[in-house]
Image: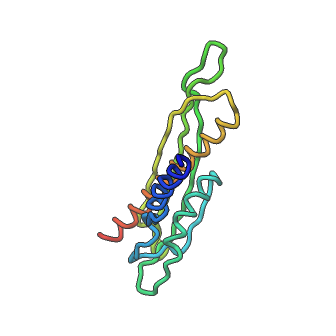
């Protein structure tokens, strides 16, 4: 009897969560601009994450929209901030630097640089360390791509 009661309660808890209407912030918007071409250089992983986010806007094709081209350069650095008595790293800082230019009709109308960092503890398990570094890299890169989209929206509003 107790097992059936627990299953029924779990079912009622899971149903509202499954019907959640999540959608990405920038996906369903109808922007009055289009990203025509994006040229990437630098850190491939960061560029891939930014490109996936910007593809949502790039696919919105309309003849009446302003068309922008982007040149994006990214760089990733890792610095050891502190070490233990053996010389092994304790705290590590990951820095992501992105420089980008927004071009319209062959001329640069905006040039910006974004630098984001995150400090994290070193882990003895190499697999766990790589996994947490990947998550940190994805979070920072997604944040930077949101900033790029926001600056283009603000540029277009002026």
Q: Position of residue 40 (x, y in %)?
A: 60, 61
Residue 39 lies in what quarter of the image? bottom right
Residue 21 lies in what quarter of the image? bottom left
Judged left or right of residue 155, residue 122 is right
Residue 43 showing in the rendered view: yes
Q: Position of residue 145 (x, y in %)?
A: 48, 58
Residue 99 showing in the rendered view: no
Q: Decide which of 55, 135 is in the foreground and name it.
A: 135
What's the coloring here? rainbow
The residue that appears at 55% across and 27% down in the rendered structure is 91
Q: Quadrant of the image for the C terminus?
A: bottom left
Residue 20 lies in what quarter of the image? bottom left
Q: Is residue 99 above or below residue 77?
A: below
Can you name the residue that lies furthest to the front here? 1
Q: Decide which of 22, 34 is in the foreground and name it.
A: 22
Q: Position of residue 128 (x, y in %)?
A: 65, 36
Can you name the residue that lies furthest to the top here? 85
The residue that appears at 49% across and 71% down in the rendered structure is 57
The residue that appears at 44% across and 72% down in the rendered structure is 28
Q: Position of residue 100 (x, y in %)?
A: 49, 58
Q: Is residue 130 above or below residue 111?
A: above
Judged left or right of residue 148, residue 124 is right
Q: Is residue 104 above or below residue 3?
A: below
The residue that appears at 49% across and 57% down in the rendered structure is 14
Can you name the residue that lies furthest to the left here? 158
The image shows a total of numbered marks equal to: 0
């Amino acid at each position: 009897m107790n097992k059936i009661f627990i299953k029924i309660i779990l079912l009622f808890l899971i149903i509202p969560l499954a019907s959640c209407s999540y959608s990405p912030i920038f996906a369903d918007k109808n922007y009055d601009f289009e990203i025509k071409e994006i040229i990437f250089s630098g850190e491939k992983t960061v560029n891939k994450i930014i490109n996936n986010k910007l593809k949502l806007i790039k696919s919105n094709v309309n003849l009446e929209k302003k068309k922008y081209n982007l040149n994006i350069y990214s760089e990733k650095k890792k610095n050891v901030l502190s070490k233990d008595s053996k010389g092994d790293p304790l705290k590590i800082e990951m820095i992501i630097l992105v420089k980008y230019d927004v071009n319209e009709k062959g001329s640069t109308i905006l040039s910006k640089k974004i630098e984001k960092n995150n400090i994290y503890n070193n882990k003895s398990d190499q697999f766990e360390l790589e996994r947490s570094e990947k998550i940190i890299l994805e979070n920072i890169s997604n944040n930077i791509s949101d900033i790029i989209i926001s600056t283009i929206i603000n540029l277009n509003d002026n």
